[in-house]
Image: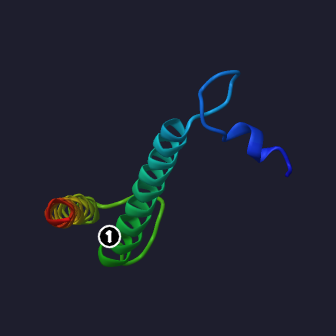
Amino acid sequence: MDGFGSDFSAGGSGGKLDTGTIMEQVKVQIAVANAQELLQRMTDKCFKKCIGKPGSTLDNSEQKCLAMCMDRYMDSWNIVSRTYNSRLQRERARM
């Protein structure tokens, strides 16, 4: 082993991480990765949609387009996320 085994053993004494702590850290890392992916996709899609000719500044129509695009994207993301989580909860309840 290259040192990983000693850090991940169960029983939270002596600076060792328990399984619950590890799971929480993984969940946080997944949430951060999902947020980064959301931001990247939203930026890519809205930039392609709203910016015709990139320059040093955005004109009013580009700013409005970006704001509306990002709002719609976030609204859509939230709807899909809520629906997905609702279905997961229903599936877990059936088991």
Q: Quadrant of residue 85?
A: bottom left
Badge 1 element? helix
Q: Quadrant of residue 59?
A: bottom left
Counting every numbered tag in the picture gives: 1
Q: Quadrant of residue 93?
A: bottom left
Instruction: Classify 10 Å Cα crowding around label 1: few (below 14), some (14-19), many (20 and above).
Output: some
Q: Residue furthest right?
A: 2
Question: Could you say where residue 4 lies in the image, as x and y percent from the top left?
Answer: 76, 46
Left of 17 or right of it: where is 55?
left
* Residue at x 14% of width, y 65% of height: 94
**Considering only vertical position in the picture, is 75 above or below 46?**
above
* Residue at x 45% of width, y 56% of height: 36
The amino acid pointed to by label 1 is Cys
Question: Could you say where residue 70 lies in the image, as x and y percent from the top left?
Answer: 25, 61
The answer to which of 58 and 86 lies nearer the viewer is 86
Left of 74 or right of it: where is 83?
left
Question: Could you say where residue 62 lies in the image, as x and y percent from the top left?
Answer: 28, 65
* Residue at x 48% of width, y 59% of height: 56
Question: Could you say where residue 39 lies in the image, as x and y percent from the top left?
Answer: 39, 59
Q: How is the image coloured?
A: rainbow
User: Where is the C terminus found, in terms of image quarters?
Assistant: bottom left
The answer to which of 14 and 65 lies nearer the viewer is 14
The answer to which of 28 and 79 lies nearer the viewer is 28
Which residue, given by chain and number where applicable, does mark 1 sit on? 46
Left of 32 or right of it: where is 75?
left
The answer to which of 72 and 12 lies nearer the viewer is 12
Q: Residue furthest top?
A: 14
* Residue at x 36% of width, y 72% of height: 51
**Considering only vertical position in the picture, is 25 above or below 81?**
above
